[in-house]
Image (spheres, helix red, strand yellow):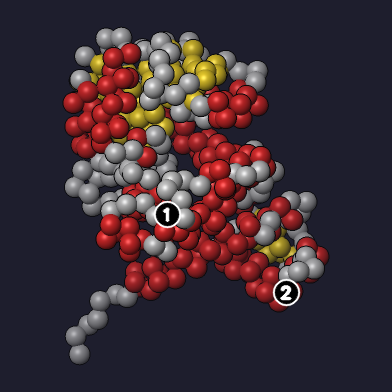
């Protein structure tokens, strides 16, 4: 009998969604918040509407995933869960996890149709033509939780984005669509001589005020697609370009190029595909995520370089950071 190929990769993928849903469910139920005060047994934190055996089974599963630790019969948050899966943590990612559970999870169920039609799945999944932000964020608490999740994600990546290139030559950074200002804050910490600002829509700027209070990050209300861009010799785009089609990207890059002085730069933070498109897996998964939810995609450095060259940029370089986002720096001729 011929030796059979190793099936472990296939089996792992069959089971992979179960691991995600286990974490999503634990976050949705507030499990890690209940353990914020310290170790507790399952029956001590069980809610009246939860089955005791099922809750303990979920908690044991979280131990196996490294999200909880077990001390005798008591459970405690792991360091990672305490930092990222607790709503009260300054680095919480629960908002994005809830969004993944409530929005992305059902949309991914229609991936086959997205592949056949080449379009996002908002209409099919939720009956609307675009992102259901008005429905999903019908309460300020929910909107806040999501934005806190994105802030936590940004705090993990921004220090690497601003350090992977030497940005000493630049004097003023404006982050276009920069939300809570985590990237300008990281830049100011590394390059104290800089000044830095966020340009974003009014709702995002209003939320950002609590994160930038007492810092040197300036907040500017505006729309980078239609409004005048504030003067800067370095603009940043973090997780922006992957939302849009090539035509919209060309229009945005042309606006940025026109606003930059000679020698000015554009810093792009996105997950880069390898130039031969062989990976990494995380970039391909995010590209499919863009397919079901936007008109965009993930791209390789070579694909970004082509768009940047069309806009007039000269010197450009891409670097893998080892974090969930990579970086591209392009310089105006």
- In the picture, the disc for residue 191 is none
Q: Is residue 266 above or below residue 20?
A: above
Residue indicated by mark 1: 123
- Disc 1 crowd, CA 10 A, few/some/many (<14, 14-19, 20+): some
Which residue is nearer to you in this view: 214 or 258? 258
Which of 130 and 64 lies nearest the eye of the viewer? 130
Location of residue 162 (image quadrant): top left
Task: List x then y, in percent, for residue 180.
Answer: 55, 29
> Position of 254 compared to 276: left or right?
right
Q: Secondary structure at mark 2?
A: loop
Q: Reading the chain from its start, which is encountered first: label 2 or label 1?
A: 2
Q: Residue 24: where, in percent of width, then height?
A: 57, 59
Residue 29 % position (x, y): 67, 60
Work out whether 86 lies above or below 160: below
Farthest bottom residue?
1
Residue 62 sits in quarter: bottom right
In this rendering, the answer to whether 54 lies above or below 295 is below
Dot 1: what SS? helix
Side of 218 where 233 appears, left or right: left
Q: Is residue 180 visible?
A: no
Residue at 43% x, 13% y: name it: 230
Residue 21 screen position, x and y as percent? 53, 63
Whether residue 69 can be seen here: yes
Left or right position of 258 against 81: left
Instruction: Identify the residue shown where x is 54% and y is 57%.
Output: 101
- Quarter of the image where the N terminus is located: bottom left
What numbered label is drawn on residue 51? Answer: 2
Badge nearest the viewer, 2 or 1: 1
């Amino acid at each position: 009998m011929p030796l059979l190929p190793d099936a472990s990769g296939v089996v792992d993928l069959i089971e992979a969604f179960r691991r995600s849903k286990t974490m999503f469910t634990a976050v949705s139920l507030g499990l890690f918040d209940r353990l914020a005060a310290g170790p507790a047994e399952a029956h001590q934190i069980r809610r009246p509407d939860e089955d005791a055996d099922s809750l303990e089974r979920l908690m044991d599963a979280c131990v196996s995933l490294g999200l909880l630790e077990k001390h005798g019969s008591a459970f405690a948050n792991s360091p990672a869960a305490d930092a990222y899966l607790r709503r009260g943590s300054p680095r919480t990612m629960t908002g994005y996890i809830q969004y993944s559970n409530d929005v992305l999870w059902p949309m991914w169920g229609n991936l086959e149709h997205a592949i056949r039609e080449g379009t996002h799945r908002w209409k099919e999944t939720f009956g609307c033509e675009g992102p259901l932000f008005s429905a999903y964020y019908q309460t300020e608490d929910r909107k806040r939780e999501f934005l806190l999740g994105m802030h936590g994600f940004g705090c993990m990546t921004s220090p690497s984005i601003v350090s992977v290139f030497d940005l000493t030559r630049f004097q003023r950074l404006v982050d276009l669509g920069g939300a809570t200002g985590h990237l300008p804050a990281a830049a100011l910490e590394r390059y104290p001589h800089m000044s830095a600002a966020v340009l974003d829509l009014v709702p995002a700027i209003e939320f950002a005020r609590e994160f930038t209070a007492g810092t040197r990050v300036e907040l500017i209300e505006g729309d980078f697609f239609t409004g005048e861009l504030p003067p800067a010799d370095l603009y940043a785009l973090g997780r922006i370009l992957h939302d849009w089609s090539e035509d919209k990207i060309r229009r945005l890059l042309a606006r940025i190029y026109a606003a930059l002085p000679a020698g000015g730069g554009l810093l792009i933070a996105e997950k880069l595909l390898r130039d031969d498109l062989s990976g990494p897996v995380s970039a391909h998964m995010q590209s499919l995520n863009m397919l079901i939810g936007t008109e965009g995609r993930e791209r390789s450095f070579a694909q970004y370089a082509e768009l940047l060259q069309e806009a007039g940029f000269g010197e450009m370089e891409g670097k893998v950071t080892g974090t969930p986002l990579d970086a591209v720096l392009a310089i105006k001729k």
